Amino acid sequence: MPFLLVGAAMAWPTAAAGAESRAAGSDPDRTALLAEGNRLHDAGRYEEAVAHYRGALQRFPGDPDFVYEISLSLYSMGRFQECVDNAEPFLKKSGRRKPAFYGLIASCFDATGNLKKANKLFDKGLKEFPDDPNLLFNAGVTRLRAHEPSEAKNLLQRAARARPQHAPSNLLLAVAYEQSGDRVPAFLAYVRYLARAGIEPTAPTAAAKLHDLLGQGLKQTGESSYELQISVPRSEAPDPYWNAGLSMTLGAAVVATEEWANRTEGEKLVYRLGAVIEALGKSDVRPHDFAMENYAPFARELRARDVLEPFVYRVFSPLGLDGFQEWLNDHQDRLRQLDEVLAEWDRP
């Protein structure tokens, strides 16, 4: 799964910087200089962006926005030590850019493999700025790189609460759940991510991961024979996900029978997702269970509002499954219904 992590980690600084820089400052000249630097950076012309921002610092000495943008472009060129050296003095100053400096410097340590130092700096930054969504998200990414899924889940759940519309938080949570062996929460997080992902480059990979997740627990042992692998709860405490996990495995078994041999792949996937979501309705919510409190209601909404079918065809269409693109072309009205439901949902 590293391709997911790398994409998410590398995307953060650019996205964060662009949004903040364009909003910063009321001086028209300063705003224009920031906008031109952003344009150069967004075009991948990092050397020119650095030179431009350094020129701007001649007019606005010590301006944290220009210093941050220089550091960001250095980061984007892989000049991580220069990035750290340029940004580090601003950790001793206050201001709205300070969380971004923490995150960017820690990301430099992450990029050079110094995960321990990155985690230490993220922790320090989060003590000062406990609700900063970028710090939370990137700290979660680094914890995943360090194979610390429990810590990653905590950070990414906080990131999703702080910024509910941020799709990558849901994607990285799915990865963290998978690392922990939490199959159903991972299923729910992938569903939530894919509902938001649109044309993001990671969407097809996430769809493939969800497709694979649905098939876990069913092992083909012969031409027409299968073996079910069902885990038994290890403790007496009720597991709110056990029914859904069982339904996921049984759903894969059902569509492998002769009775389903002539059904389309789309019909099979709609049935399988629906079975898992229906089983969630029979589960009790554990207090402070993020996936059950946030993701499960969204999945139930898809089924209750009769838009699970267009959801399945849209999110799995990048996998090249037979008939999916044709279905999308012929059912634009159903896709509009799905979009109406998605637009109403503002929770993580």
Image (cartoon, helix red, strand yellow):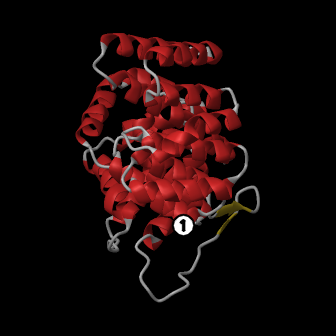
Question: Disc 1 marks which residue?
Answer: 150
**Residue at coordinates 42% horizontally, 20% vertically from top-left?**
329
- Rendered image quadrant of residue 337: top left
Q: Which of 247 and 76 lies nearest the eye of the viewer?
A: 76
- Please give left or right for residue 328 compared with residue 110 in the image: left
Amino acid carrying mark 1 in the image: Ser
| Crowd band around label 1 with a 10 angstrom C-alpha radius: few (<14), some (14–19), many (20+) | some
Q: Which of 13 and 82 lies nearest the eye of the viewer?
A: 82
Q: Which of 71 and 282 lies nearest the eye of the viewer?
A: 71
**Residue at coordinates 26% horizontally, 35% vertically from top-left?**
343
How many labels were placed on the picture?
1
Q: Check the image and report above or below for 347 versus 176.
A: above
Q: Check the image and report above or below for 341 versus 136.
A: above
Can residue 187 be seen here? The reply is no
Residue 263 spot, x, y in % from top left: 51, 43
Can residue 294 be seen here? The reply is yes
**Residue at coordinates 30% horizontally, 56% vertically from top-left?**
297
Residue 55 spot, x, y in % from top left: 53, 13
Q: Check the image and report above or below for 72 versus 5.
A: above
Secondary structure category for the residue under label 1? helix
**Residue at coordinates 43% horizontally, 86% vertically from top-left?**
237
Residue 341 spot, x, y in % from top left: 26, 39
Q: Which of 133 and 187 lies nearest the eye of the viewer?
A: 133
- Please give left or right for residue 153 compared with residue 225 in the image: left
Farthest residue in the right direction? 222
Residue 89 spot, x, y in % from top left: 54, 41
